[in-house]
Image (cartoon, helix red, strand yellow):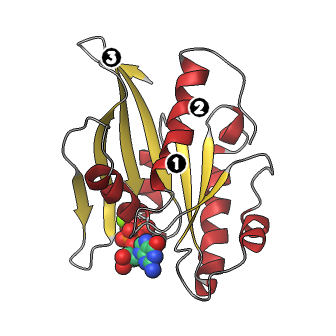
């Protein structure tokens, strides 16, 4: 959380998860497809194939005095240092997992890395929503198997999404933004799913 020169509060929300899981697609849908979130532009630093090389960024307004600075990390293995940097000062996380069974190891690796970076702060200090994306795939992995693989605390909310159609996207974002406001502005205890 930071306060800008105009006195507005900024909370940092970061989408994490393996490369190709759908982080940028979700942010783009939120930016273009969701009404009622006042916002600025979207900044994407991507390679010609559309894979994020540093981050995406887009500001969203909650109220006149509260903003969410929303980032996606670059999921490819070689961008680990960038991910670590983007996660500095994070106030809320959305972990995007790919329902494609071929991506199973990548999902697990991304979850292990997140624990390496943030450890016990996950959920306790930094609210997390698990986003099970690409639920439209005919061979999508069972939800329970994915949650077992990711190995986050059982109490954490997990939402099914189809980023390319916007299904579940607003709900996932709102669960984290609401939790950030409750914890930081109203000072309530973490909510359990
Ligand atoms: N079928 C299907 N495809 C999806 C869905 N969400 C994203 N995709 C596709 O998955 C590919 C990767 O999506 P991105 O949003 O670029 O993935 P990313 O997580 O930002 O990847 P990095 O930037 O490399 O970390 C794109 O071709 C998307 O169109 C979904 O819900 N269903
Ligand atoms: Mg991306």
**Tally of marks:** 3
Q: Position of residue 98 (x, y in %)?
A: 56, 73
Is the CB of mark 2 within 8 Å of ligand 1? no
- Marks 1 and 2, how far apart in space? 12 Å
Res 44 quadrant in image: bottom left
Residue at the disc numbered 2: 179
- Name the residue at 66% across, 31% down: 125
User: Residue 112 appears in which quarter of the rendering?
Assistant: bottom right
Residue 112, which numbered label? none
Residue 28, quarter of the rendered image: bottom left
Image quadrant occupied by the C terminus:
top right
Q: CA distance from mark 2 to mark 3?
A: 17 Å
Q: Is residue 82 above or below residue 60?
A: below
Label 2, secondary structure: give it: helix
Is the CB of mark 3 within 8 Å of ligand 2?
no
Q: Earlier in the sequence, mark 1 or mark 2?
A: 1
Which quadrant does ligand 2 occupy? Answer: bottom left
Nearer the viewer's eye, disc 1 or disc 3?
A: 1
> Which structural element holds mark 1?
helix
Q: Is mark 1 within 8 Å of ligand 1?
A: no
Quick one: label 2, few (<14), some, or many (20+) residues within 10 Å? many
How far apart marks 1 and 3 lie (CA) works out to 22 Å
Image coordinates for residue 183, horizontal then vertical, percent = 61, 22
* Residue 129 position in % (x across, y down): 61, 48
Q: Give the mark, 2 or 3, whose residue is nearer the N terminus.
A: 3
Q: Which residue is identified by label 3?
A: 65
What percent of the width, then of the height, locates residue 95? 57, 56
Residue found at x 60% / y 87%: 102
Quadrant assignment for the N terminus:
top left
Q: Circle 1 sits on which residue?
A: 171
């Amino acid at each position: 959380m930071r306060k800008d020169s105009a006195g507005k509060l900024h909370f940092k929300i970061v989408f994490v998860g393996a490369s190709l899981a759908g982080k940028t697609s979700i942010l783009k849908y939120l930016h273009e497809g969701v009404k009622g979130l006042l916002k600025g532009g979207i900044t994407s630093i991507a390679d010609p194939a559309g894979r994020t090389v540093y981050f995406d960024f887009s500001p969203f307004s909650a109220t006149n005095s509260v903003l969410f600075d929303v980032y996606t990390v670059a999921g490819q293995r070689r961008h680990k240092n960038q991910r670590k940097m983007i996660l500095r000062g994070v106030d809320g996380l959305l972990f995007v997992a790919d329902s494609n069974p071929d991506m199973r190891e990548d999902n697990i690796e991304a979850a292990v890395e997140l624990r390496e970076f943030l450890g016990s702060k996950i959920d306790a200090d930094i609210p997390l929503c698990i986003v099970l994306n690409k639920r439209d795939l005919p061979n999508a992995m069972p939800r329970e198997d994915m949650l077992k693989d990711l190995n986050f605390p059982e109490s954490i909310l997990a939402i099914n999404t189809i980023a390319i159609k916007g299904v579940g996207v607003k709900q996932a974002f709102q669960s984290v933004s609401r939790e950030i406001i409750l914890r930081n502005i109203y000072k309530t205890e973490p909510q359990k799913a």
